[in-house]
């Protein structure tokens, strides 16, 4: 004889629990549960321990959407990187994350791939989620993005570069000045033929800004700028190809120094030199930008500019926290401030021009 089957109610999924369920189990109000997540210092130790046990047992996660709608903003800071895969922006993100860690705010990232249109789409999406603040890594937004940003009543920080007359706080350095710094390093050694090599991806507008600074320094010294654009997509291959073209030029006319827009291109050139029968820096001094991990391990070691990547991210997040704290106190908004964190020139073996001394 078949035994009757016991009909059990389906087990409720953890994600189906609401803040009211947690409050009922703890014998407190839903407002107290909300405070436990957003302002735990306002909840007694005993209640915090009780809520902690219930939340962990249920696997309860508070709804960020509901919280954002209730407070007018979520518990997230949204940041849009230009190339999230690069070591440069990885350090930037780490600085932001470390600074925000103790605040209860989470960092959400988007990758714009140097595209203004992709940045605009990311801004539009992020704004729809009611973030606490936005951190951007460019300042030349599309008109639509600029309009959205100016209409927001949340903190906005533009990090990485610096330009004049922006309505938002900025943290970084003027990239044109980085180009000037590299050019002057070679000019001071007596070099007159100095080439600047851009990557093929013309969307890298910061590299273009550095090339413009280089050209300005060359003109100021009475020299003719020489800006070339790599043809290969891969930066290492691009550097190798540019050095191959350098080797084919007559010695009397080839550049005495080459400034690559990034360290990976410079590394590609240095690694290719032995196969071309070139000795660097005797057959051409080389410098890069970014201080990639490989730069000091090359032979010759690579002269480069080191941006304060981590510190820029950290300072951008710190600026956000200061602005949020001022808003909570209902202070008058502070005028936009530009925080300059300059690059450090690391002079290594690759940039000695001829028999000149390193400057």
Image: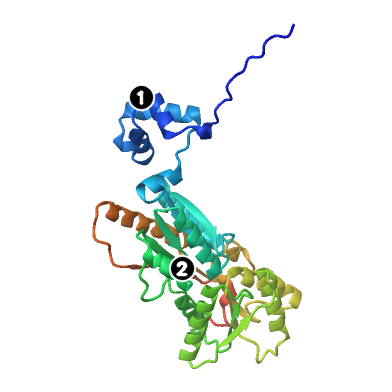
Picture quadrant of residue 202: bottom right
Residue 80 drawn above or below residue 235? above
Instruction: Check disc 2: other Cα within 10 Å, few if <14, some if 14-19, many if 20+.
Output: some
The reply, left or right, for residue 287 in relation to residue 42 is right
Which of the image's four quarters has the N terminus? top right
Residue 157 is marked as none
The reply, left or right, for residue 203 in relation to residue 245 is left
Residue plotted at (67% across, 11% down):
4
* Location of mark 1 (residue): 27
Badge 2 element:
helix
Residue 273 drawn above or below residue 76? below
Q: Estimate the x, y position of residue 84 in percent, counting from the top left.
A: 56, 60
Q: Estimate the x, y position of residue 285 in percent, counting from the top left.
A: 60, 79
Can residue 92 be seen at all in this image of the molecule? no
Residue plotted at (28% across, 51% down):
328
The reply, left or right, for residue 23 in relation to residue 240 is left
Along the polypeptide, which appears first: circle 1 or circle 2?
1
The reply, left or right, for residue 268 in relation to residue 221 is right
- Pick the residue in front: 88 or 37: 37
Badge 1 element:
loop
Residue 145 is marked as 2
Residue 51 drawn above or below residue 283? above
- Pick the residue in front: 58 or 178: 58
Q: Estimate the x, y position of residue 133 in percent, counting from the top left.
A: 40, 56
What is the spatial separation of the Cα atoms under label 1 and label 2, in whole angstroms? Answer: 46 Å
């Amino acid at each position: 004889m078949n035994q009757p089957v016991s009909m059990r109610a389906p087990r409720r999924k953890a994600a189906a629990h609401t803040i009211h369920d947690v409050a009922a189990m703890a014998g407190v109000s839903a407002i107290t549960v909300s405070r436990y997540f957003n302002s735990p210092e306002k909840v007694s130790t005993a209640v915090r321990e009780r809520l902690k046990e219930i939340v962990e047992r249920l696997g309860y996660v508070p709804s960020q959407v509901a919280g954002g709608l209730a407070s007018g903003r979520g518990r997230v800071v949204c940041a849009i990187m230009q190339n999230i895969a690069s070591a440069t922006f990885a350090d930037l993100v780490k600085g932001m994350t470390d600074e925000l860690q103790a605040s209860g705010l989470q960092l959400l990232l988007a990758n714009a791939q140097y595209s203004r249109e992709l940045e605009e789409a990311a801004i539009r999406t992020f704004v729809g989620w009611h973030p606490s603040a936005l951190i951007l890594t460019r300042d030349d937004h599309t008109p639509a993005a600029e309009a959205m940003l100016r209409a927001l009543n949340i903190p906005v920080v533009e990090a990485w570069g610096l330009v004049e007359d922006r309505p938002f706080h900025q943290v970084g350095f003027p990239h044109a000045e980085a180009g000037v710094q590299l050019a002057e390093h070679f000019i001071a050694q007596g070099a007159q033929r100095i080439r600047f090599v851009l990557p093929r991806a013309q969307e890298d507008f910061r590299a273009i800004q550095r090339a413009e600074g280089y050209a300005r320094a060359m003109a100021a010294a009475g020299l003719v700028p020489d800006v070339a654009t790599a043809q290969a997509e891969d930066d290492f291959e691009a550097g190798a190809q540019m050095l191959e073209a350098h080797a084919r030029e007559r010695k009397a006319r080839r550049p005495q120094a080459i400034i690559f827009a990034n360290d990976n291109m410079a590394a590609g050139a240095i690694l290719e030199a032995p196969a071309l029968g070139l000795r660097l820096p005797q057959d051409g001094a080389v410098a890069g930008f970014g201080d990639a991990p490989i730069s000091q391990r090359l032979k010759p070691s690579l002269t480069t500019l080191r941006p304060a990547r981590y510190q820029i991210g950290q300072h951008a997040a710190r600026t956000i926290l200061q602005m949020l704290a001022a808003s909570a106190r209902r202070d008058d908004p502070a005028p936009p401030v530009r925080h300059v964190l300059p690059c450090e020139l690391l002079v290594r073996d690759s940039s000695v021009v001829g028999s000149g001394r390193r400057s």
